[in-house]
Image: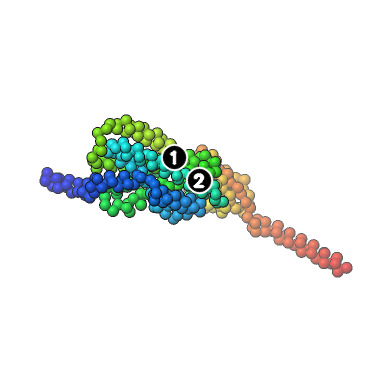
Amino acid sequence: MSTKIQIIKRYFRSLFDLKGSQEDELETDREVREGVVFKGKNLWLLAFAIFISCIGLNINSKAAVIGAMIISPLMGPIFGIGFSLGVSDIDLLKVSIQNAIRIVLISLLVATIYYLITPYAIATDELLSFSNPTIFDVLLAFIGGMAGFIAISRHNGTQVLIGVAVATSCIPPLCTASFGLATLQWQYFVGGLYTYFINALFICVGSYIIVKYLKFSPHSKENVKNVNSWFGILIFLAIIPAVYLAYNFAVTNIFTSKANQFVTNEIDSKYHVVQTKINNKTKLIEVDVIVERYDDSLQYSIQKQLPKYDLKDSKLKIYQTIEAGKTNFKEFDKLNSEIELLKNEINKMKAR
């Protein structure tokens, strides 16, 4: 029995083993250091990626935004921070942070210039979607960081890195921040920067964990406990707003879902609904319906059904529009008859 257990253990170890296909540590170290340096080709590629992303966000083109994220080389310094913390390399950490800051400044400069000179600086839905990060963005960045560094530590991991760049969406938030800066709408500036910061931070966390798991040799015996402690505090402080925003996001979605279900089951199934407005802040549901004749008790009778959908604290407002051609059909006929009589009278007067 013990032999079988050992065989099963060895099987699962080999199945989930990351060390077996890992490239030489020195090769990974060289790749990380090359990616950290941000000048020349990388700088131009970033500028082009920013322009493409701004245009894509302007026209709500997901394809353009994804293309910009694939082109962009800004992941290098972010992985460099995670790697340097994992191997206790203070010099590489300083260089990585300097280049990461340089990326932000260059991106803000290029995108702000674009939004200042373009006549189409519009706050599109795609643009604004990158100003309110939640805990789900944190999870994407964290898992993406782990996947990304696993790819860096292998031969030919480029495809995975492209996927990580798209999934974690680091470029668009910087465009959103620049839009806020160019138009002096500070909520978008702060929201975009926070979204980028939280994405970059948790990519670092994910890559740091993989570096530790793969047991990379430390580059120095220098004490980095204080650095890691501050890094941990930064993570804690950064995640608080994201958790709060995620809670609000969940509450809003739940209310919207219940309200839509209520309108579909209790109103749309019996009347022709023209328009529905749901205000999540005031808990107000407004519905425009077409009816054959005005009914004073309509709103009261429907409002009684709100508790069935856990909406007892919500407010309902129904606007009734009387359908022409049914209730008013006789009135229209009468008016037409009167018009014909008037025409006849006019004709008789002319004939005289």
Residue at (65, 56) in percent of width and height = 324
Colour setup of the view: rainbow
* Three-letter residue code for mark 1: Tyr
Residue at (56, 51) in percent of width and height = 119
In the displayed structure image, the side of residue 332 where residue 79 appears, left or right: left
- Categorize mark 1 by other alpha carbons within 10 Å: few (<14), some (14-19), many (20+): many
90 in relation to 141, above or below: above
Q: Which residue is mark 1?
A: 194
Rendered-image quadrant of the N terminus: top left
**Callout 2: SS:** helix
Decide which of tag 2 and tag 1 comes sooner along the chain.
2
Q: Position of residue 70 (x, y in %)?
A: 39, 52
- Of badges 2 and 1, the one in the foreground is 2
Residue 131 in sight in this render: no
> Between 219 and 189, which is closer to the camera in this rendering?
219
> Between 83 and 297, which is closer to the camera in this rendering?
83
Residue at (76, 60) in percent of width and height = 338
Q: Position of residue 341 (x, y in %)?
A: 79, 63
In the displayed structure image, the side of residue 196 where residue 24 appears, left or right: left
Rendered-image quadrant of the C terminus: bottom right
**Spatial distance from mark 2 to mark 1, Cα to Cα?**
17 Å
> Between 58 and 278, which is closer to the camera in this rendering?
58
* Three-letter residue code for mark 2: Thr
- Categorize mark 2 by other alpha carbons within 10 Å: few (<14), some (14-19), many (20+): many
Q: Which residue is mark 2?
A: 112
**Callout 1: SS:** helix
Q: Position of residue 310 (x, y in %)?
A: 47, 41
Residue 117 in sight in this render: yes
